[in-house]
Amino acid sequence: GADARINPDLNNQIDEMRAEVVHWLAELDKFFGYQVKRPLIILTIPDRLSVLVGDGYSLETAGAYGNGVVLLAITDDGIDQSTLVHELAHHYIHELSRGNYPVWYSEGLAQLAEWQLVGVRWFDAVEDYTYYKYSIEQLNRDFYGLEDQVSAYRNAFELVYFLQVFGGQANLDILAALAKGKDLEQA
């Protein structure tokens, strides 16, 4: 399993959390077709996650990923499975592409894993279909700086989903090509 650091305030949930992490790592191994080097997983309380991530980042149940480290905020209800899968998927994408990927592609593919494995798409309530407002160039340039983040995330998901539906194993092939140093357009 993965190496985990767990906030002492969560001691009563340790066994349950470890079981969830092990389960979702196995599911992601199947989803991506590979077992990657396991990440360091830091499970903490929401206030502590905000401090660790910084920049005023604060959500009741949230996570973050950075270069082999998955940070997850745990509430009284335990681990949010969709957040866990999403952040773990970022790790798989990072490992399988050797860190060579555009942010929007990683966000779209992490959302695809979240949807296919857990059945959650966080933007399902959006009905105005404005999510195609950004071009790939805009997504590439400053994904997290785009004004309408819901549209940016949905656009990223739709692009990756299109590749999966119409390209079969296209996303796995793209990750392999990215790992060889190609850019996304070449991949």
Image (spheres, helix red, strand yellow):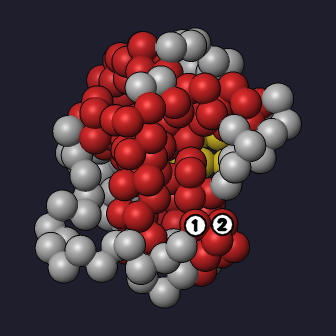
Identify the residue at image location x=36%, y=63%. 154
Vertical arrangement, residue 128 with respect to residue 20, above or below? below
- Location of mark 2 (residue): 140
- The residue located at (82%, 29%) in the rendering is 180
Looking at the picture, tell me which residue is in the foreground, 139 or 4.
Answer: 139
Q: Position of residue 7 (x, y in %)?
A: 50, 42
**Left or right of 21, for residue 49:** right
Helix, strand or loop at mark 1? helix
> Which residue matches tag 1?
136
Quadrant hosting residue 181: top right
Of all residues, the one furthest to the right in this rendering is: 181
Q: CA distance from mark 2 to mark 1?
A: 6 Å
Mark 1: which amino acid? Ile
- Residue 67 vs residue 12: left or right? right
Q: Could you tell me residue 27's position as x and y percent?
A: 37, 18
Mark 2 neighbour class, 10 Å CA radius: few under 14, some 14 to 19, many 20 or more: some
Q: Secondary structure at mark 2?
A: helix
Above or below — where is 160 with respect to 145?
Answer: above
Whether residue 30 is visible to the viewer of this picture, yes or no, is yes
Which one is in front in this view, the residue at disc 2 or the one at disc 1? 1
For the residue marked with disc 2, what is the amino acid? Answer: Asn
Q: Can residue 39 be seen in the rendering of this structure? A: no
Q: Is the Cβ of the residue at disc 2 closer than 8 Å to that at disc 1?
A: yes
Look at the picture and state if 178 lies above or below 183: above
- Label 1 environment density (alpha carbons within 10 Å; few <14, some 14–19, many ≥20): some
Residue at 28% across, 33% down? 116
- Circle number at residue 124: none
**Residue at position x 30%, y 79% in the image:** 130
17 with respect to 170 (left or right): left
Quadrant location of the C terminus in the rendered image = top right
Position of residue 135 in the picture relative to residue 137 (left or right):
left
Q: Nearer the viewer, residue 87 or 1?
A: 87
